[in-house]
Each structure stands twice: as C-alpha cells, then as structure tokens.
Image (cartoon, rainbow, N blue to C red):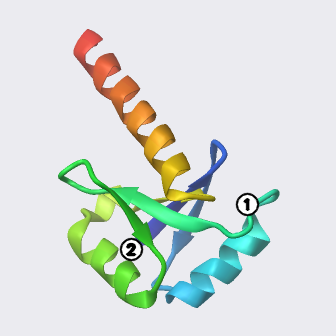
Amino acid sequence: MSLKLIFNNETKKLSGQKNYEDLVQYVNRAFNSLPKPFKFFYKDADGDIISVTSDDDLDEFRSTMSSDGLKLYIFGSQKEANDILNQNFSMINETMKLG
C-alpha cells in the first residue's frame, strides 16, 4: 500500500507501512522548508479536515480512507489546512461540474 505525502505542491510517494515517528523522519528528509512544527492532515468522506499526530491517528486514517486515496497533506496549522484544502477541493468540484 502506498501513501502520497503532499507539501507545497510537491508530492512524494512512499510504500510500505510506517509508524508515525518514521513518517515524520521521512518527511523531514524528503521536503525542504517545512514549517516548524508541522502536522499531517487529510479530508475525510464527510468533508472534515482531520489531523494526524500519532500512531493511532495514522491507523485510523489508513482504515477509513480507500487504498487509492491515501494522501496526507503537510501544513503548519489546522487553519492553514482548512483554508487550503477546502479551497482546493472546491476548485476540483467546480472543474468536475464543468467537464
């Protein structure tokens, strides 16, 4: 199962199961200019922005998201995640309506 990590319009694909600490270490090596501190976020099926800050959160993310939709976004705050993810998903929905 692969996981896509998205930060600042850059995407990295990671295979295999990592625990939360390993994921944090990977992201620190893989991306430049990360906010300090940073958190992982995803948008669930209800449209809520959910933060991932522990192994339990990561397990919940994996169990509730479809295997082709394993995308974690990296932001410095919940507000930034809400602002950007809600804006991006709105644009995607509008594009799909036009297409």
Q: Can you say which quadrant of the picture contains the C terminus?
A: top left
Nearer the observer: mark 1 or 2; the answer is 1
Could you say where residue 32 lies in the image, as x and y percent from the top left? 81, 59
Q: Can you say which quadrant of the picture contains the N terminus?
A: bottom left
Q: Residues within 10 Å of mark 1 (few under 14, many from 20)?
A: few
Residue at the disc numbered 1: 35
x 52%, y 85%: residue: 20
In the displayed structure image, the side of residue 64 where residue 81 appears, left or right = right
In the displayed structure, would residue 3 be above or below residue 32? below
In the displayed structure, would residue 49 be above or below residue 92? below
The quarter of the displayed image where residue 38 is located: bottom right
Helix, strand or loop status at disc 1: loop
Could you say where residue 43 lies in the image, as x and y percent from the top left? 33, 53
- Compare residues 50 and 97 and report the one nearer the observer: 50
Q: Earlier in the sequence, mark 1 or mark 2?
A: 2
Number of marks present in the image shown: 2
x 73%, y 60%: residue: 35
In the displayed structure, would residue 84 be above or below residue 48? above
What amino acid is labelled 2 in the image? Met
What amino acid is labelled 1 in the image? Pro
Q: Kindly give the residue lying farthest to the right in the view shown.
A: 33
Separation (CA) of disc 1 from disc 2: 27 Å
Could you say where residue 60 lies in the image, as x and y percent from the top left? 28, 79
x 66%, y 46%: residue: 8
- Compare residues 80 and 98 and report the one nearer the observer: 80
Residue at the disc numbered 2: 1
x 33%, y 83%: residue: 59
In the displayed structure image, the side of residue 14 where residue 25 appears, left or right = right
Helix, strand or loop status at disc 2: loop
